[in-house]
Amino acid sequence: MAAPALTVGCFLYDTTRALFDGTVSADGVDVTMKTAATLPELFDRLIRGEELDVAELGLTFYLRLLETGLPFVALPVFPNRVFRHSCIFVNAHSGITEPSDLAGRTIGEFGVYGQDSGVWAKGIIIVETLLNSLAAGEAWSPATGASEMEQTVADATRPLEDTAWPQKAEGRCLQWTPSSGDPVGVQFNAFAAQRHADGPLDTWTMWGGNTSNRPIWAIHLSAHAPASLLQDLTFELANGQSTRPAPNIQPQQPRLSALTSHPLPPFTAASRPARKR
């Protein structure tokens, strides 16, 4: 009985070369290896044709395909892994030495939300903002009443208002999305904030790529998230890394027990570079 045939498409990496030259084979399967001049060409041959049974596919391509209903199943196999910091380049003559120097500068990106390394770079900037805000002394605050929550919403979304992001109501939620540009957004769930502050529902959701239902990335926060932290994140979504004055928000008493059940090590200003705001 002939072995079943399987056509596999992937780029010629050092990790896949043995499959192409026959040094490594698959028991019980007749494997034919195919490649292409560029990765997008390989992806296109998988999506639009029927010549490939299994193929390498960028994560951002796959996530966008989920919306179309195409019959693809993702396998946790990674033929190539890259240190994504290597995908960020700075002009040596620009004088840029830290992220805050990007204010007012022109930033280029290939493919916007259609290219994995660009999505990773945007995501890590958002995560860095979150961690920096926490390290600067922001922690989860006790649940607040209706009037305090209204003020939190106003403070947290001020950067969106300043950059003219339209607000719309979707059931029990308020949503903010830009009129043009990258598909990103912020959602506030009033029902979760008022009735389920300590429950499983997310009060705040910040997302990017595709749609709010199937985002490429998302950050979920509870009603305990302080306004200053939320404002840091909405500012990054609306403006990117930039220099701004510190928000005029009254600090709340930290409650670190909501973050971890173990004592946190002491944090000193000398342990990380100062962040311009």
Image (cartoon, grey):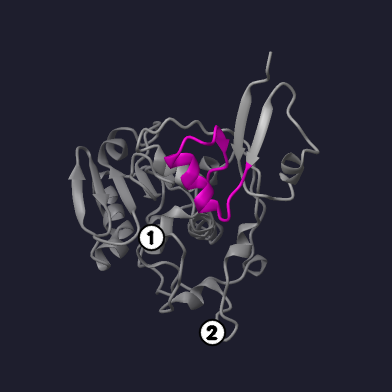
Q: What residue is pinned by disc 1?
A: 237
Residue 186: x and y in percent read: 32, 51
Q: Is residue 18 visible?
A: yes
The quadrant in which residue 250 appears is bottom left
Q: Position of residue 101 (x, y in %)?
A: 50, 78
From the viewer's perspective, tell me whether residue 231 is left or right of residue 53: left
- Of 47 and 100, the residue lying toward us: 47
Residue at x-position 43% and y-position 78%: 105
Please provide percent x and percent y for residue 87: 59, 63
Q: Residues within 10 Å of mark 2 (few under 14, many from 20)?
A: few
Answer above or below: position of 139 versus 55.
Answer: below
Q: Residues within 10 Å of mark 1 (few under 14, many from 20)?
A: many
Give the side of residue 134 with respect to residue 182, left or right: right
Q: Is residue 252 visible?
A: no
Q: What residue is shown at x 52% (from left), y 59% (from top)?
A: 121
Precedes in sequence: disc 2 or disc 1: 2
Residue projecting furthest to the front: 2
**Furthest residue toward right:** 23
Queried whether the magenta region covers residue 255, the answer comes back as: no
What x and y, as percent, mark residue 115? 48, 55
Identify residue for label 2: 94
Q: Secondary structure at mark 1?
A: helix
Q: As shown in the figure, which amino acid type bears the numbered disc 1?
A: Leu
Report the magenta residues as a range.
34-58
Identified by mark 2, the residue type is Ser
Determine contact: label 2, label 1, CB under 8 Å: no
Left or right of 7 on screen, residue 190: left
Instruction: Quarter of the image for the C terminus: give it.
Output: bottom left
Q: Nearer the viewer, residue 86 or 56?
A: 56
**Residue drawn 38% across and 60% down?**
237
- The quadrant in which the N terminus is found is top right
Out of 47 and 68, give the one closest to the viewer: 47
